[in-house]
C-alpha cells in the first residue's frame, strides 16, 4: 500500500483523485520538486523550498502553505506512513482546478499532490560512468522555473535511452546548458570544475548548488561559465548531478571518450565529499 497526500488528506495512491479540470492536467500550469530522504530526514530541504518559492513566484501561483514548517511535517508524516527508510518525495503544485480558460481563474486554490517513490541507484553507473549524447536545447527561456511542462526533456531522455545512453546534454548556440534531467559539468583543461551559470537557461539544481559549495569549501576552483562542445571534448572529466542520480561520472559524449574513458579522479573525490555531506545531514 502506498499513501499520498492530496490537498490536505492522506489517501491510497492508486485511488487518489484530482479533477480533470486541474490546470496542471490541462495546461501544465504548475511546478514540482523532487527531494531525497534518508530516515525521516529530507536532504537539502531548505534549498528545495527556496527553489519551490522561486518557481511559484515565476508562475504567479499563490503559496498553498503559509509556512514551510507545515510542509516539512507533511513530508515526514508521509515518509512514516509509507514505512520507507530511504527514497524520494515528489511534490507538485498547480494553479488549481477550474473550467478550461487560459486566463488565471479568480477563485480556485492551488492543488497540492505529494507522493513518495523509490528508485535504486545502479552502483555500476557510478563505478563505470555513463554515456551522454548532445542535442539542441528546444526548451523555453525560463528553464530556471521547475515547471511540470517537461516535453522536450521527456523526448530527449527517451532519445538517449533508445540510443543506449543515459542522458542527453542540450546545447544553445553550441554552448551546453544542461541535461534533460540533470546538470552538466566538466573538469576543464586547467583542472577547474566548469558548469553553466545558474541563469534562465538552466534549472539551478539543488545537487549542483551543493556540489559547488562543497568544492569551494575544499578550495577546488569552480567556474560558472558555459562550455562549448569543443571544451567538452577536450575536457579531463565530465559528470552530471541530480537529486535522483546524485553525481554520475560521464565517460563518453556522442561515443567519443572523455579523458581515459573511466570515471575521473576529481569526480570520485566529489562523490565522496557529497556522500559525507549527506551522511552529516542524516545525523543532524
Ligand atoms: N530533475 N536539470 C533538470 C532539467 C532536471 O530535471 C533536474 C532534476 C536537474 C537537477 O536538479 P536537482 O539537483 O535539484 O535534482 C537539473 C528531477 C530529479 C526530476 O525531474 O526527476
Image (cartoon, helix red, strand yellow):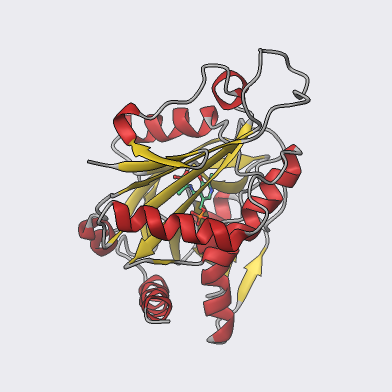
Q: Is residue 242 visible?
A: no
166 displayed left or right of 65: left
Along the line of sight, the residue nearer the viewer: 164 or 48: 48
Question: How many numbered marks are there?
Answer: 0
177 and 279: which is toward the camera: 279
87 sits to left or right of 97: left
Report whether 138 appears left or right of 156: right
* Rendering coords of residue 152 (x, y %): 53, 29
Taking 184 as reference, is 283 above or below it?
Answer: below
Q: Is residue 147 above or below residue 265?
A: above
For this orientation, the residue located farthest to the top is: 100
Query: In this orientation, does residue 182 appear?
Result: yes
Q: In which quadrant is the C terminus drawn? A: bottom left
Q: Residue 86: image x %, image y %?
A: 29, 61
Q: Quadrant of residue 67?
A: bottom right
Q: Is residue 154 above or below residue 211?
A: above
Q: Quadrant of residue 93?
A: top right
User: In the drawing, does residue 101 fall left or right of residue 206?
Assistant: right
Q: Nearer the viewer, residue 53 or 99?
A: 99
| Residue at image location 68% in from the left, 58% down from the top | 197
- Please report the residue visible at 58 percent of the width from the left and 18 percent of the height from the top: 26
Q: Quadrant of the N terminus?
A: top left
Amino acid at each position: 500500500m502506498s499513501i499520498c497526500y492530496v490537498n490536505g488528506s492522506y489517501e491510497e495512491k492508486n485511488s487518489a483523485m484530482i479533477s480533470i479540470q486541474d490546470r496542471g492536467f490541462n495546461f501544465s500550469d504548475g511546478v514540482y520538486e523532487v527531494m531525497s530522504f534518508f530516515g525521516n530526514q529530507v536532504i537539502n530541504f531548505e534549498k528545495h523550498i527556496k527553489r519551490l518559492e522561486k518557481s511559484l513566484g515565476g508562475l504567479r501561483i499563490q503559496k498553498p502553505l503559509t509556512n514551510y514548517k507545515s510542509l516539512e511535517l507533511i513530508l515526514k508524516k508521509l515518509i512514516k506512513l509509507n514505512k520507507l527508510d530511504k527514497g524520494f518525495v515528489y511534490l507538485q503544485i498547480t494553479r488549481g482546478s477550474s473550467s478550461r480558460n487560459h486566463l488565471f481563474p479568480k477563485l480556485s486554490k492551488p492543488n497540492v499532490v505529494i507522493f513518495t517513490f523509490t528508485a535504486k541507484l545502479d552502483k555500476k553507473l557510478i563505478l563505470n560512468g555513463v554515456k551522454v549524447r548532445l542535442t539542441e536545447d528546444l526548451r523555453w527561456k525560463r528553464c530556471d522555473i521547475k515547471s511540470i511542462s517537461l516535453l522536450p526533456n521527456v523526448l530527449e531522455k527517451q532519445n538517449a535511452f533508445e540510443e543506449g545512453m543515459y542522458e542527453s546534454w542540450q546545447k544553445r548556440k553550441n554552448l551546453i546548458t544542461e541535461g534533460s534531467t540533470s546538470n552538466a559539468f566538466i573538469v576543464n583543461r586547467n583542472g577547474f570544475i566548469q558548469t553553466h551559470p545558474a541563469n534562465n537557461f538552466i534549472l539551478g539544481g539543488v545537487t549542483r548548488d551543493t556540489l559547488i559549495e562543497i568544492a569551494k569549501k575544499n578550495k577546488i576552483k569552480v567556474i560558472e561559465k558555459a562550455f562549448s562542445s569543443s571544451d567538452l571534448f577536450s575536457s579531463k572529466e565530465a559528470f552530471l548531478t541530480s537529486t535522483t542520480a546524485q553525481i554520475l561520472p560521464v565517460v563518453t559524449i556522442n561515443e567519443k571518450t572523455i579523458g581515459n574513458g573511466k570515471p575521473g579522479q576529481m569526480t570520485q573525490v566529489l562523490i565522496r565529499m557529497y556522500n559525507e555531506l549527506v551522511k552529516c545531514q542524516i545525523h543532524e
